Amino acid sequence: MAAHTTAPGVDLPLPKPRTKGTSRAPGEKSLVASPTTWIVWAGVAAFFIYLLGILISVIVDSLGRPWFDSWLPENATTDWYTGAWERFGMAQVIGVTLTVAISVIVLSVLIGVPAAYLLARRSFPFKRILTLLFLLPVLMPPITYGIPLATVMYNFGLGRSLLAVILVNLVPSVPFVIMTMTPFIEQINPTIENAARMSGANMRMVFQKILLPLLVPGILAAAVLVLVRTVGMFELTYLVSGPGSDTLVVAIYRAMTASGGGEARQLVSSMAVVYTVTMMVILIIALRYVSPTQLVARVKESRED
């Protein structure tokens, strides 16, 4: 027999059955999804089906011989990958792509983090105007400032060189680092730095011992953004690159337009698959060291401090 939790003789009111059309009690969840939820999930499913269809079609095209009367090729081959690797010098192109990406990441962090610290901690005249100038390369289409920038590079004799590719990619990458790091630094309580200075620490020690451990998640997040943008940047890289300094995305475009589009479509598809796999490997390695949930948690901790 169940034990009574009320005094003897006291009857508790029974819940009234809810009739049709009666609203639910506060906090009670409905087991039936709303039409809006179904529409959202249908849109997400359609997007992933569309994306998966594109990827599968490119992969199939890169592995099959020419076919016309069937959905799938009659036999598969990896000769297109071997041909693209030898014909377009894929080893050198991937090496150039990684060199440009790593160089841009390092330089962007070295320039952007101190600039973000000044914008977050200092007040000076024309601060808003300077912030707007930093945002212009992100807001404007790259081709609008890419042509004058490429003209400057060619006038200084840097055109079609690896250095030119790195320099032009710094223009949109540094603002990305500043945009990412400025709000992150603002969430760190400045009293921590003041306490360290009162204890005798100079600015270098404050940065190395106090700020840097707190900024590591933000720096890694900014590095991932710069990595993705640099590897996928076509306009700026195409304007100043040449043989020996083309990144992977530019090499794909040159393969598509070589000899008036005379290259086999399967060669271009195989290069696209290599580009996609390279990007996925880079992102998997990058996300191994930075997690969006870790970044949000660290910002929350900084707010509480």
Image (tube, helix red, strand yellow):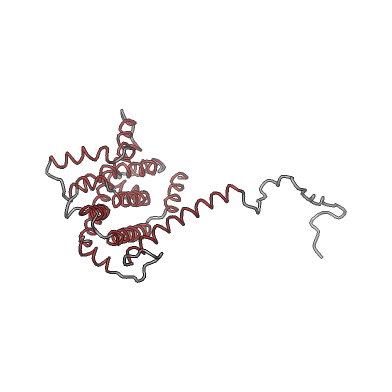
The answer to whether any part of residue 241 appears in the image is: yes
Instruction: Looking at the picture, tell me which residue is in the foreground, 69 or 40.
Output: 69
Given residues 241 and 4, the one toward you in this image is: 241
In the image as oriented, which residue stretches furthest toward the top? 125
Looking at the image, can residue 202 be seen? no
**Left or right: 157, with 84 as reference point:** left
At x 29%, y 69%, the residue is 78
- Where residue 257 sits: x, y (%)? 24, 52
Q: Nearer the viewer, residue 74 or 158?
A: 74
Residue 233 x %, y %: 29, 48
Q: Residue furthest right?
A: 9
Residue 191: which quarter of the image?
Answer: top left
Q: What percent of the width, then of the height, locates residue 34?
A: 62, 49
Of the 4 image quadrants, the one containing the N terminus is bottom right
Count of numbered marks: 0
Front residue of 203 and 60: 60
Q: Which image quarter is the C terminus in? A: top left
Please give left or right for residue 272 compared with residue 6 in the image: left
**Residue shown at 22%/52% (left/top)?**
260
Residue at left 37%, top 43%? 185
| Image spot of residue 12 (x, y percent) | 82, 51
Residue at image position (86%, 55%) is 8
